[in-house]
Image (cartoon, rainbow, N blue to C red):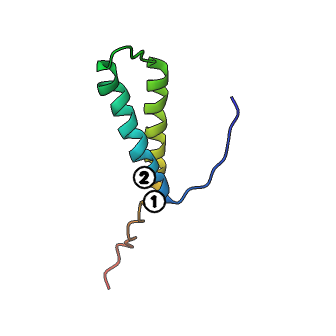
Amino acid sequence: MTSITVKFTAKELELLSSLASDQLFRREFIDPRLPGYKSNASELSLGKQLVERMRLLTDRATRTPSPRTSGAAA
């Protein structure tokens, strides 16, 4: 499998993961009700894994570091 590197801002990645999640929902719950629809379970599974990876990256990028406490009284 070929690896491709693309740079996104945290906000762009958050939007992309949201859009992908909405599309996966549609493919899993709405499209199967349409006549002639053929599902692809492996593609759906791969999509879910991809959305999870994007969300983890977004969480890491937007996480603010917690203030460090030294434990010493001022």
Instruction: Name the outermost residue toward the front.
Output: 35
In the figure, 70 relative to 14: above or below?
below
Alpha-carbon neighbours of circle 2 within 10 Å: few (<14), some, or many (≥20)?
some
Would residue 60 appear left or right of 72 to someone viewing this image?
Answer: right
Left/right placement of residue 17 relative to residue 5 reads left
Q: Nearer the viewer, residue 48 or 72?
A: 48
Q: Nearer the viewer, residue 69 or 32?
A: 32
Whether tag 1 and tag 2 are in contact, CB under 8 A, the answer is yes
In this rendering, the answer to whether 74 lies above or below 46 is: below
Label 1 residue SS:
helix
Q: Residue 11, which numbered label?
A: 1
Number of numbered labels in the structure image: 2
Task: Please identify the residue farthest to the bottom as the structure is shown.
Answer: 74
- Give me the residue at 43% from left, 39% from top: 52
Distance between the alpha carbons at the discs numbered 1 and 2: 6 Å
What percent of the width, then of the height, locates residue 51? 44, 39
Q: Which quadrant of the structure image shows residue 48?
A: top left
Identify which residue is drawn at 39% across, 32% down.
Answer: 24
Amino acid tagged 1: Lys
Q: Position of residue 8 (x, y in %)?
A: 56, 56
Helix, strand or loop for disc 2: helix
* 11 sits left or right of 22 in the view: right
The amino acid pointed to by label 2 is Leu
From the image, tell me which residue sits under label 2: 15
| Most foreground residue, 24 or 64 | 24
Front residue of this view, candidates 67 and 26: 26
Q: Position of residue 62 (x, y in %)?
A: 43, 60
Q: Residue furthest right?
A: 2
Q: Position of residue 32 (x, y in %)?
A: 33, 19
Pointer 1 local density, CA inside 10 Å: few below 14, some 14–19, many at least 20:
few
Of the 4 image quadrants, the one containing the C terminus is bottom left
